[in-house]
Image (cartoon, rainbow, N blue to C red):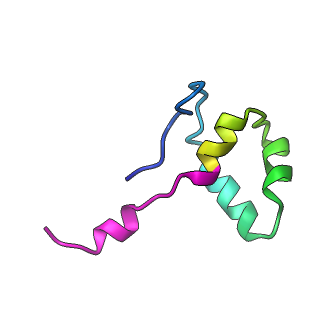
Amino acid sequence: MHRPVRCFSCGKPLADKYEEFEQRVKDGEEPEDIFEEMGIERYCCRRMILTSIDATEQMIEYER
């Protein structure tokens, strides 16, 4: 399952935001501050980034 390329609600492109967001959270920054600096203002877009997961690595472990 890949992450959504666009916000399901408003259609704003988000694909280029996931990696930077995850790295900054790992570095200890607060998500709210990250969103403000990245210019992600809509709650729907914030929800998409906070709740989406990339399960590709987990799925690769299993054979058919």
Q: Is 26 contained in the magenta span?
A: no
The answer to whether 40 is drawn above or below residue 1 in the figure is above
Question: Image check: 30 left or right of 25?
Answer: right
In the rendered picture of this protein, how many numbered marks are placed on residues?
A: 0
| Residue drawn where x is 47% and y is 48% of the image | 3
Q: Give x and y (percent) for residue 29.
A: 83, 63
**Which residues make up the magenta segment?**
50-64
| Residue drawn where x is 73% and y is 32% of the image | 42
Along the line of sight, the residue nearer the viewer: 4 or 9: 9
Q: Give x and y (percent) for residue 46.
A: 69, 43
Question: Image check: 20 left or right of 3?
Answer: right
| Residue drawn where x is 37% and y is 61% of the image | 56
Could you say which quadrant of the image residue 25 lies in? Answer: bottom right
Question: Image check: 4 left or right of 12?
Answer: left
Quadrant in which the C terminus is drawn = bottom left
Could you say which quadrant of the image residue 37 lies in? Answer: top right
Could you say which quadrant of the image residue 38 lies in? Answer: top right
The answer to whether 34 is drawn above or below residue 30 in the figure is above
Q: Give x and y (percent) for residue 9.
A: 57, 28
| Residue drawn where x is 77% and y is 70% of the image | 27
The answer to whether 26 is drawn above or below residue 24 in the figure is below
Extreme top residue here?
Answer: 10
